[in-house]
Amino acid sequence: MIYTETLAALIEAASTQYSSRTSHIWRPGLRALRFTYGDIGRMSRRAAALLQRRGVGDGDRVVIWAANSPYWVAAFWGCQLLGAAAVPMMVQNTPDFVDRIARFTEAKVILATSSRGHHFGAVPVERLEEVLGPQGSQEEDYTPGRVSPDSVAQILFTSGTTGEPKGVVLRHRNILANLRGVADLGILRPDDHFMSYLPLAHVFEQIVSLFLATSAGAPVTQAASLAGSHIRLCMEEDRPTVMTSVPEFLKRAVQRIESRAEAMGRLERLYRLYKLAPRLPMALRRRLASQILQRFGGRLRLVVSGGSALDPEVGRKWEALGVMVLQGYGATETSPVVSVNRPRGRKVESVGPPLPGVEVRIAEDGEILVRGPNVADGYYKRPEETAKRFREGWYFTDDLGEVDADGHLHIRGRKKFLIVTPAGENIYPEDLEAELNSEPEVADSAVLAIAPEGRFEVHAVLLPLPGSSIPDPRSVVERVNSRLQPHQRIQGVSVWEGEDFPRTVTRKVRKDEVRAWLLGRQTGEASAPRLTVAGALERAVAQAAGISPEQVLPEYRLEADLKLDSLGRVTLAGIIEEEMGVILDEGRLEPSTTVAQLKELVAEERGREDRYEFNPRPLSQKARFWRFLLQRLLAFPVIDIFAPMRVTGTERLQGLEGAVLFMPNHISPADGILLKAIPEPWRSRLAIAAAADVLYEKPGLKRFAGLLELLANIYPFSREGQIRSALQYTGRLMDRGWSILVFPEGRISMDGHLQEFRTGAGLMAVELNAPVVPMAVKGTDRVIPPDADRPMLPRRSPVHVRFGHPVHFAPGTDYASAAQRIRSEIAAMLRELEQDG
């Protein structure tokens, strides 16, 4: 572990001491990008040099408005090297709010992702990927700032988009005191690997996957999307051991585990494990749950939960699977950790004892007060707010709690949401919500006190499970009331009309907004819930189109009304994936698609099960051994008999290394025999993309799919529908060192002439970041005719295969241009083959 007095010293030491260690793995596209701590150090110095050229110096503010990425990390460290204060913003923040904060903090520069094409008047905007990516300036020379422990490291805004913004000022000494307290718990191991999907604009994610990981020199996998399939891909490929999470993610993951177990007829077995687990050591629990844990990479051992209260039952279920859950408590104002469970003596129903050096006191009214070196001095330019919450060295949290005999802190809820009945009795909404959430029809709930027509009422708002409803909410409340004390009982109930409650970044329910909706509903003034899928979709469309969300109407068409051309629709799909966690294939976004239809597509994709669950079996050593034998002893001798092959152009592959994308023309169902023409070392690590709607779905062919997976290592590639998933599957294969043979025409040519290439071929050529080897084939259509739709005996005919020169495409190359370049290369070789006879 590295301990320093400033964050600037921390990144300088880590980039030197851990220079060759992997720092980040990130998948913004089809392939994984890997960065070392040395890379991050160099990018941080480039960021510092850029900012200094823009006039940034000691104490100046720099807004960072971007999703998690290694570029975000380098931008943050660049601020620290200069002694500037970073002002991280959530990617979901509106341009107006970002502009407001930039002006409020008098920011010198805004660092944003390239997808955010907004302008902010006098504040210059730099695009992170452009200035810190490979194409940006490589200048690393800068004059270090005068950084001290008292320097402001960052200003984090905790308010929403309404009201006066409230920025927490965190100094280097606050963050590093908290880092040391967490590091001294001894929860890390030398081989730990972090999984990061929560936003780095929140200090909870920073303390673990940024500061703790850097101090330990540990690798971090950064999710580039909130889509469940993307997070699962990252975990399966990189096999992390530690993850920060919020309770809602853990709850939904358990629900998916149980739904999957039920579908497989193994739910009773899972429940037996839950019951038996407390008497078993963790290692044995992990062994019994190994199949489940494989979906999280197989090595996940520790989850740090924070942001809101974790249902103890959910925590126990994770523990039953052999994953230790350490729930903690904190706030932005405390940098953030106040208390956390330790590996020994942990209690899933508590948030653990305070960190060493942190004092916790319970006020007479039950409010939690915190004092220590991790506590901020106050709010930026908000002296009145500072005076309310920071008094005599104590931070007044507005949370209610108690400390048990073992020194563990227990959270009872927010002080402002405490319900006091007319009889003076206290009701903690969280207790009632826990009971409501245990009902099978209820996904989540919010309990509030309202006074319709002046009459006090404890009211529950219920959120149904995705895709379902709660037809009789009153019966749900009656069952729950039977388990509550008389003074706790719920009098009123409503069902939330959107897909989800409005939530904070750590997935807490925004009860003020729920209350506003509820009161408006009772007075007949309520509109649809603000943060439903439709609301989030409108913001995504508005961001892509460069207009305000209020201007987005359901009948608007993507191209004619919103002016989103093909590139704009690709951008829109990326925003929807990044901010809503839904992967849409750009091909389904037609120019004529309306916003209403887009909403239906999003809802449809949310419920779709990804057909491209990665299958590692054909890649195993055992499968490769049998494939080698079957090819040499069976397949290749048969090919020599029926399709004697002449191969030319292999000299063009000399000096080529690593995974390669082979792209031949497609004239026969027998074109898979081309694998024999591909020289080693690529042949032994080759996968063939097979049309999913043909080989995996046609009755006459699909029964042979398993045999061909073993014999030729084919995998399903969708030509329609889940194209993105097929492309990601391909990227995973190439990340593992496998070359790919794919037919860029997308279908067999019935007349032998080269067809037009799909733009997807160009996308693969550019985004897979690998050399493309064009191939020309002649003669396979005489071995098996192009219209054959079932297995048949081949006819003997010679086959000629020619390899072209490898083609490399730079990032950002136009996909259609790339596809046309490859087609031209193949067309030229086909003419040569014709001339050769």
Image (cartoon, rainbow, N blue to C red):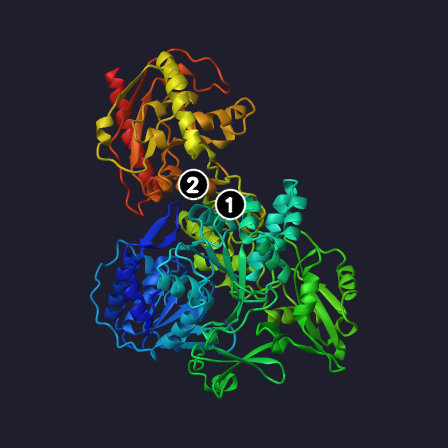
478 left or right, relative to 75: right
Residue at 51% in and 56% down: 580
Q: State yes or no: discs 1 and 2 in contact (Cβ < 8 Å).
A: no
737 above or below 40?
Answer: above
Viewer-closest of 418 and 552: 418
Can you give x and y, in whole percent of width and height, for residue 86 in the image?
36, 71
| First in sequence: mark 1 vs mark 2 | 1
328 above or below 755?
Answer: below
Mark 2 lies on a secondary structure that is helix
Dot 1 corresponds to which residue? 294
User: Does residue 467 appear in this view?
Assistant: no
Dot 2 corresponds to which residue? 727
Say which quadrant the N terminus sits in.
Answer: bottom left
Dot 1 amino acid type:
Gln
Mark 1 lies on a secondary structure that is helix
Can you give x and y, in whole percent of width and height, for residue 71 in the image?
34, 59
Viewer-closest of 652 and 600: 652
342 left or right, relative to 651: right
Can you give x and y, in whole percent of width and height, for residue 348 in the image?
59, 63
Q: Quadrant of residue 367?
A: bottom right
Dot 2 amino acid type:
Leu
Say which quadrant the C terminus sits in.
Answer: top left
